Image: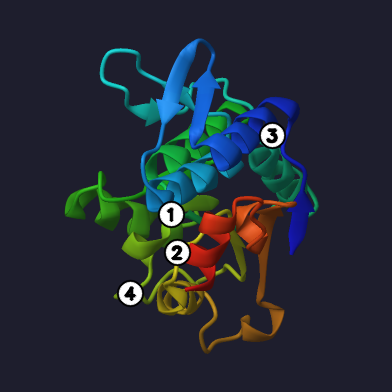
Amino acid sequence: VIIVELNSEQRRIYNEMETQQLAYLKSHPWVTEVPIAARSALKTITLATPSIDPVTEEISFDEDASSSKFDALMGELALHPGERAVIATDRKRFAKLVVARMRAAGLNAVEWSGDVNSAGREEIKRQWLAGEVDYIVCVMKSFSTGLDWAQHNCWRIGVLSSPEGDPTTKQQFLRRVFRTGEHKDKFEWFEILAENTYDSGIFQNVELQALAQQ
């Protein structure tokens, strides 16, 4: 488990959203009307500094969005140069951001999400087995079942975020790499969590805390 501190802007937005269910992204307000929506928003904020479309009010991440988790991920990967890894999040927009950032840093990474069709997935499988891809960044649910090839020449998994209240999906995802074979004894997985946040079940808001306990 790797614990990171949110950067100052992430922390400001996080604290505003947790205590008020309202946060300002630059000059635009981001409002969540129910606790479940607020909890989802908090999780988004732990991934990277979010932005909002002033017209559609859609939440996304800018290309240069700061992210303590991404910085920690790159640090972890740098400790094991040349080793392949499957990296997961539960947010498709963040998966796309991570892939773009990794590629910009010169790493050979591909996205696996609902936006990748069956032909694209077959091509990723071919590239993986041929050693042409080093990192698969996936949406966890889309990579949790029905795959029996990701363990080839790979024994490392990284988790940036998991689906809430769904431990089965995480276990199934880990089994994509933790399988029988010559490298099973090398298997290692790491999870990156933001300190004093939703990640560790810590809430200042009593209503959110009660919801989490339920």
Residue at image location 37% in from the left, 77% down from the top = 148
Q: Position of residue 49 (x, y in %)?
A: 57, 29
Dot placed on the residue nearer the N-terminal end, 4 or 2: 4
Marks 4/3: CA–CA distance: 35 Å
Q: Which class describes the residues within 10 Å of circle 3: few (<14), some (14-19), or many (20+)? A: some
Q: Is residue 123 left or right of residue 192?
A: left
Q: Position of residue 154 (x, y in %)?
A: 57, 67
Q: Which class describes the residues within 10 Å of circle 2: few (<14), some (14-19), or many (20+)? A: few
Kind of residue sitting beneath label 4? Thr
In the image, which disc is placed on residue 90? 1
Direction left: furthest residue = 118
Direction bottom: furthest residue = 180
Q: Is residue 28 left or right of residue 125?
A: right
Dot placed on the residue nearer the N-terminal end, 4 or 1: 1
Direction top: furthest residue = 27
Marks 2/3: CA–CA distance: 21 Å
Kind of residue sitting beneath label 3? Arg
Dot placed on the residue nearer the N-terminal end, 2 or 3: 3
Dot placed on the residue nearer the N-terminal end, 3 or 1: 3
Q: What residue is disc 3 on?
A: 11
Q: Position of residue 195 (x, y in %)?
A: 75, 51
Q: Marks 4 and 2: which is nearer the front?
A: 2
